[in-house]
Amino acid sequence: MSGTPRRRVGVFRTQVEWIDTDAAGIHHNSTVVRFVEAAEARLMAGHGLRDYFAAAPRVRYEVDFEAPLFFGQRVTATVELVHVGTTSMTFDFEVWGEAFRGRPRTCAARGRYVTVHIDRDHREGARGTPWPADWVGRLVPPSPR
């Protein structure tokens, strides 16, 4: 049931709002996580997996913050599913601040995270359980022959 998908990407475009910033108008680091999760939601919804989030907690999250995002700046977050394992999925992401007030388009953050499939009824405790075959079929296209 394991495999590497061919280019499964979710994209979320938004604008940095005041609530996303500190008093200087620079984004809170947690805002990046919200943008990334919104891109992930677009990816999963695009594959018909609306129940995904209730069964897929993050177990590892790594991010490099490279540049600030500013109040009013447009942002593009992309998430790419890079590996589907038996019980886990690995994603790479980037969050880009679009050109703003004389600043060029810049990568604000990039990183990687892992989700694990859990039994929503917690019959298996906190252990990972295999991804449903239907989900894997939607996310990992058959290999060309």
Image (cartoon, rainbow, N blue to C red):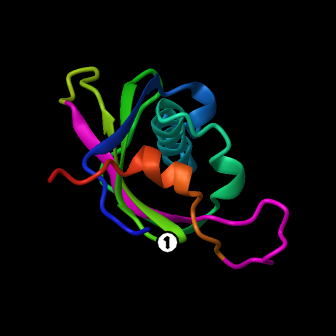
114 on left or right of 132: left
Quick check: 103 above or below 94?
Answer: above
Quick check: 140 above or below 18?
Answer: below
Residue found at x 54% / y 49%: 134
Residue 76, horizontal then vertical, whole percent: 36, 31
**Res 97 → quadrant:** top left
Residue that lies at the very extreme toward the front in this rendered image = 145
Quadrant location of the N terminus? bottom left
Dot 1 amino acid type: Thr
Check residue 60 for magenta coloring.
Answer: no
Disc 1 packing (10 Å; few <14; some 14–19; many ≥20): some
Q: Nearer the viewer, residue 58 or 136?
A: 136
Residue 62, horizontal then vertical, whole percent: 43, 67
Q: Nearer the viewer, residue 96 or 49?
A: 49
Residue 128, horizontal then vertical, whole percent: 64, 74
Q: Is residue 24 visible?
A: yes
The residue pinned by badge 1 equals 86
Residue found at x 46% / y 23%: 15
62 on left or right of 64: right
**Res 92 → quadrant:** bottom left
Q: Is residue 64 visible?
A: no
Check residue 116 for magenta coloring.
Answer: yes
SS label for mark 1: loop
Residue found at x 46% / y 63%: 89
What stretch of residues is rendered in magenta?
105-127
